[in-house]
Amino acid sequence: MGRKLLLANIDVPGIRGFDAYRAHGGYAAVEKALRGMSVSEVSAEVNRSGLRGRGGAGFPTGLKWSFLDRKSDKPRYLVCNADESEPGTFKDRYLMHHLPHLLIEGLIISSYALGVNTCYIYIRGEFKYIVGILERAIREAHQHGFLGENILGTGFSLNIYVHPGAGAYICGEETALLESLEGKRGNPRIKPPFPAFKGLYGCPTVVNNVETLATVVPIINMGGDEYARIGRGKSTGTKLISASGNINNPGVFEIEMGLPVEDFIYAPEYCGGIANEKYLKAVIPGGSSVPILPADLMLNTAKGEKRLMTYESLADGDFVSGTMLGSGGFIVYDEDQCIVRNTLNLTHFYRHESCGQCSPCREGTSWMEKVLYRLEHGEGKMSDIDLLVRVAKNIEGNTICPLGDAAAWPVASAIRHFRGEFEYHVKHPEVVKNVHHGALKIEKESLIPDSGTGVNYW
Amino acid sequence: MEYNNIITHPKFIKEGKTVAFSDEIMAKVQSLIRRYPDGQQKSALLPVLHIAQEELGGFLSVDVMDYVASLLGIQPIEVYEVATFYSMFYLDKMGKYVIEVCRTGPCAISGGEQILAHLQDVLEIKPGETTSDGIFSLKEVECLGSCGTGPVMQVNTEYYEKLTPGKVDKLLEDLREYVNRDKQGDSSWAENFC
Ligand SMILES: Cc1cc2nc3c(=O)[nH]c(=O)nc-3n(C[C@H](O)[C@H](O)[C@H](O)COP(=O)(O)O)c2cc1C
Ligand code: SF4
Ligand code: FES
C-alpha cells in the first residue's frame, strides 16, 4: 500500500467534524504557516513540492501562484474549483464529503500565501448536500478562531463562502466559472487576460481545484522537499484516482504517483480486476476528455515499457499511442462494451454541454453526434469514419476554451485505436441493428435537428 | 411600448401571481447577498434562484424571475438568460419528485440504461414528462459526479446510488407514501446555507 497524505484519517469516526479533525493533527499546518512562516516561505514550499494542478491540466501550482498580480491595488481572490463534472471524476466530492476541514485548512494556508481575504468555493449545484457539509465546517472553523478577523492573532483575516452552480459542465472551465460566480451564463472568456490579472470582478484571481488546495496541507506539514521525494520525476506526491466502469472495486483511491497501471487495475487494494471475470478492453484514464487507449497500450507503452500512473508515462507516445492523467477519472471498459456506442454517448455529453459561443464546437459536436448515431445504428457509410476524423480535427484548437478539444479527442482516439470496430458497424448493419451490443443508448429524438444548434438559445 | 411582448420564450410561463419570500427566507437571502462585494449583488443570482425555485412553486415562472430581478436590482433579462442556461433550473411545472437519471458513459455501462428503461416502464412516461397525477417527473441528466456508485439518480437533488430495478420500485413506493404524509425529502437550499 502506498502512502496516504490526504485520506490517511478518512476512517476516523467523526472526522467530518472539527473536534475529531483537530485531534488528529488538523489545523497544525495553519498554525505552522501563519505563526512561523512568511508569505513567501509558504509559496516556496509549494514550489519545491512540485505540486501540479489536480483539476485536469496539471499546471504547476507554485508557478500559477507566482503569476498573481500583486502590484494591483484591487482585492485579490482565491476561487476553489469544486465543479467536478468531468465524466468519470468523483474524487473532490469524496474528499469534501468526508474531510471538509482538510479543504478549509488548505484554503486558509493558500489564501495566506496569496494575500487573499475572500475566498469562494464554487461547487456544482447537484452537490447540494455538500454545500451544507462545507458551510458547517466553515462555521466551526470560525468558532475556533481559524477563520474571520485576525486569525490566531496574526492579523490575517479570511472569509470563505460556498457558491453553488446550477448544472453546467462548462462552469468547471475557470473563466466560465468566474462568469457564473458573477451571476451570468457560463460562457468562457477569451484569454488573455488571464485570471491572475483580470479574474473575478476584474480583480487578480487564482482558481485551483479542490484536491490541489487540500494537498497544500500535507505539503506544509512535511515540507515541500519531503513531498517531492514521493512519486516519480515531475509527478510528485500522491493523486486521488476515481475508478469506475467494469471493475470489481469502483471508488476513490489515493495512489503514490508512479504506480504501474497494471497494478492499479488488478491489485485487490485498488480496482481489484475486471468485474465478472471479463477481459480488459480499454481505459479512459483521466476523465472522459482524454484519449481512450486499448488494453495493450494502457498497460505498456508503445516502446514496451510498463505504463505508470504519472503525468509523463500516461502521455508517453503523445496522442499516437498515449493519453493523459487529466483529472484522474479512470474509466474501465470490459470486452462487452462497444466503442462506437461509447463514443456516441460521450459526444452527446459534449454536444449538450457546449456553451455555444464558438461555431466549431457548437456545430461540430452536434454534427459528430449525428454521424456517430448513424454508424451506431447500422445506417453509416465507410466515408463517415473519415468524416468524423475531419470534423474532430477542425474543432481542435479552433475554439475559445478547451471543451472543443475535449470533445474532439475522444472521437479521434476511438477511431485511431478501434477503426475496425467502426468499419464493422458499416459492414454489418443487420448485426448492430438487431443485436444488443454494449450498454449505451441514445434516443433518436434527442438529436438536434439540422436547422438547430446544440444549445438552448432562444 | 409593450415590453412584455418582446421578452417571451416559448417555454416561459407567466402566472400573473404576486410572489414573495417569507421573512425567514428573506433574511437568509439578504445574508447571501452580503457575501459578495458592494455592487456585486448579482453574484447571488444562482443561489437565490435555487432558493426561489424551491420555495416559490418548484419552477421558475416569469413572476418568480421578475421578483428575483427586483430583489437583486438587476434587469429581468439578466435573470431569464441565466435561467435558460443552467440545467437545474426548470421553466416548466414539475412533478413533486423530479427524478434525474444519469445517462453518461460510466453509469450507462454499469446498468444506467436499464434503470432509465425501467422507470419509463413503471411510470409510463418518457424523459421530459410528468405523470398525470403530478407526482413524478423524469429527466435524463449528465454525469452526477458519482460514477463509482453507478447507476445513479437524483430525486429532488438527493442522491440514490448503486441502483437496481428492485431498489427503484421500493423507492417509488416510499415516495408515493411520503406524498400523503408530505415529507419534504432532503434538506432545503436555505437550510444548507448557514
Ligand atoms: C470544459 C472544462 C471543464 C473543467 N472542469 C473542471 C472541474 O470540474 N474541476 C476542476 O477543478 N477543473 C476543471 N477544469 C480545469 C479548470 O479550467 C482549471 O484548469 C482548474 O480548475 C485549475 O486548477 P488546478 O490548477 O488546481 O488544476 C475544466 C476545464 C475545462 C476546459
Ligand atoms: S469551445 Fe465550446 S464550450 Fe468552449 S467557449 Fe467555445 S462553444 Fe463554449
Ligand atoms: S457517469 Fe453517472 S455519475 Fe458519472
Image (cartoon, rainbow, N blue to C red):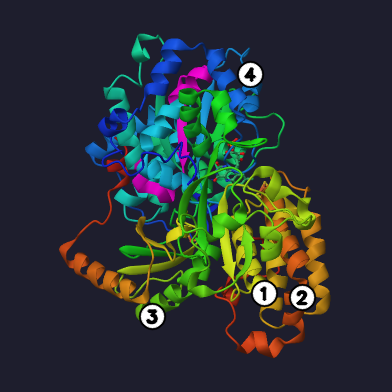
Q: Is residue A36 above or below residue A163?
A: above
Q: Which residue is mark 3?
A: B124
Q: Secondary structure at mark 2?
A: helix
* In the image: residue A377, left or right of residue A23: right
Q: Looking at this view, is A3 or A78 the one in front?
A: A3
The structure residue drawn at horizontal position 26% and vertical position 42%, both measured from the top left corner, is A13
Whether residue A370 is in magenta: the answer is no
Q: Which residue is mark 2?
A: A420
Where is residue A65 drawn, in percent x and y? 61, 24
Confirm whether residue B189 shows in the render.
yes
Q: Chain of mark 2?
A: A
First-in-chain label (4 vs 2): 4
Query: Are discs 1 and 4 less than 8 Å apart at CB?
Result: no
The structure residue drawn at horizontal position 79% and vertical position 73%, both measured from the top left corner, is A384
Q: Rounded to the nearest whole Å, what is the CA distance between mark 1 and mark 4?
A: 48 Å
Residue pushed farthest left? B181
Where is residue B68 drawn, in percent x and y? 40, 41
Front label number (4 vs 2): 2
* In the image: residue B130, left or right of residue A366: left
Q: Rounded to the nearest whole Å, what is the CA distance between mark 4 and mark 2?
A: 51 Å
User: The disc labelled 4 sits on which kind of residue?
Assistant: Asp
Where is residue A228 drawn, in percent x and y? 59, 30
Q: Chain of mark 3?
A: B
Front label number (3 vs 4): 4
Q: Is residue A443 above or below residue B6?
A: below
Q: Rounded to the nearest whole Å, what is the CA distance between mark 1 and mark 2?
A: 17 Å
User: The disc labelled 2 sits on which kind of residue?
Assistant: Gly
Q: Which residue is mark 4?
A: A69
Badge 2 and badge 3 in a common chain: no
| The image quadrant in which ligand 1 is located | top right
Q: Which residue is mark 1?
A: A373
> The C terminus of chain A lies in which quarter of the figure?
bottom right
